[in-house]
Image (tube, rainbow, N blue to C red):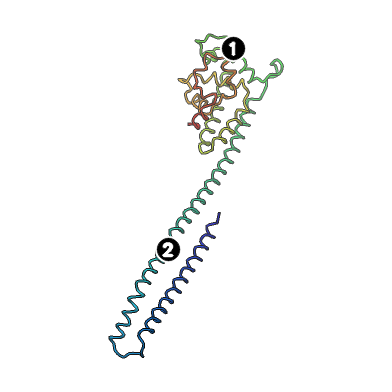
Amino acid sequence: MKKPYTQNINKYHLFNVILIIVGTTALLMLGVTFGIYAKYFTGGISTDQSLWAQFGDYFGGILNPLLSFMTILILLYTLRLQKSEIEITSKELEENRNTINSQNLLLKKQSFESTFINIMDYFSRCYSWKIKDLDNNVHYFHALIITLIEGYKDVLKSKTFNDFFYKKINEYEQSILIHYIDEFFTIIKYFDENTKTFNRTDRIIYRNLLLSKLSDNELIFIFLYCQNDWELPFYKELCERHQIFVTIKTTIEKHYPDIVDKYKPEVFGSKVLYKELK
């Protein structure tokens, strides 16, 4: 593919060639016209004004239509050349605009990625501490979650996880877990607001990066906690939009079949990334 400036050089060169051809043709036509006149109308230079007028009418009558026609052709070609230049300029501007947009998107993506990773690392560190007097040195936070999700399997289907949650653990532990939920969805909201211009592949990559930081038990806890849309509708909607539970579908269907239908099926994946994240 030729570059725009190369195309311009070629077109200007062609235009110059056309001008030379037209000029040469005009001179030849003038010579031919004068030669025909000299052949058939011999004689010296006349002093009769009427003869000079006839001589002028002869040349004008023959040359003017031809030269006018050639002038129109040159004008049409000039207009076409200008139109072509405008189109090339528009394409160059569009390419520059696309380049700038690509650069801006790349900078935005780099900035998002740096912040996103830092937030996730901070989030992981906040809930990685342990209590020494727990058996087998189990993570305190994970022990709380395991206590909840295992206990919920034994409660009646009419009970909601939130009812069970508030009755099962003490106020201090509730505060820890609620704080965890709030921080997790702060990350999800940041992800949701800053990846709208990203393509589908990038959104999936960053979503999976976040999920890789969470254990299955953490995801089950979030699933159970956010099932009541009347209490946390926006949290539940974010889970569905970004298919947060795509990695625990089998576990949920096996152990919590009674509450699977509380979420849209897309929360586990499919339907083209929930219609391109709505």
Q: Note whether 100 is above or below 149 in the view shown.
A: below
Residue visible at 31% across and 85% down? 52
Within 10 Å of the Cα at label 2, are there few (<14), some (14-19), or many (20+) other Cα atoms? some
Residue 105, quarter of picture: top right
Residue visible at 41% across and 76% down? 29
Residue with the most extreme left position: 50
Residue visible at 69% across and 16% down? 134
Percent x, y of residue 114: 61, 38
Give the left or right position of residue 69, taking residue 142 as reference.
left
Residue 182, quarter of picture: top right
Percent x, y of residue 49: 29, 87
Give the left or right position of residue 130, taking residue 275 as reference.
right
Q: Note whether 136 is above or below 203 in the view shown.
A: above
* Front one among 278 and 52: 52
Mark 1 — residue? 151
Percent x, y of residue 234: 48, 26
Residue with the most extreme front position: 40
Within 10 Å of the Cα at label 1, are there few (<14), some (14-19), or many (20+) other Cα atoms? some
* Front one among 154 and 255: 255
Q: Note whether 27 is above or below 270 in the view shown.
A: below
The N terminus, quarter of image: bottom right
- Circle on res. 77: 2
Q: Secondary structure at mark 2?
A: helix
Q: Amino acid at mark 2?
A: Tyr
Q: Note whether 63 is above or below 183 in the view shown.
A: below
* Front one among 257 and 56: 56
Residue 223, quarter of picture: top right
Residue at mark 2 to residue at mark 1: CA–CA distance: 85 Å
* Front one among 75 and 192: 75
Percent x, y of residue 215: 63, 23
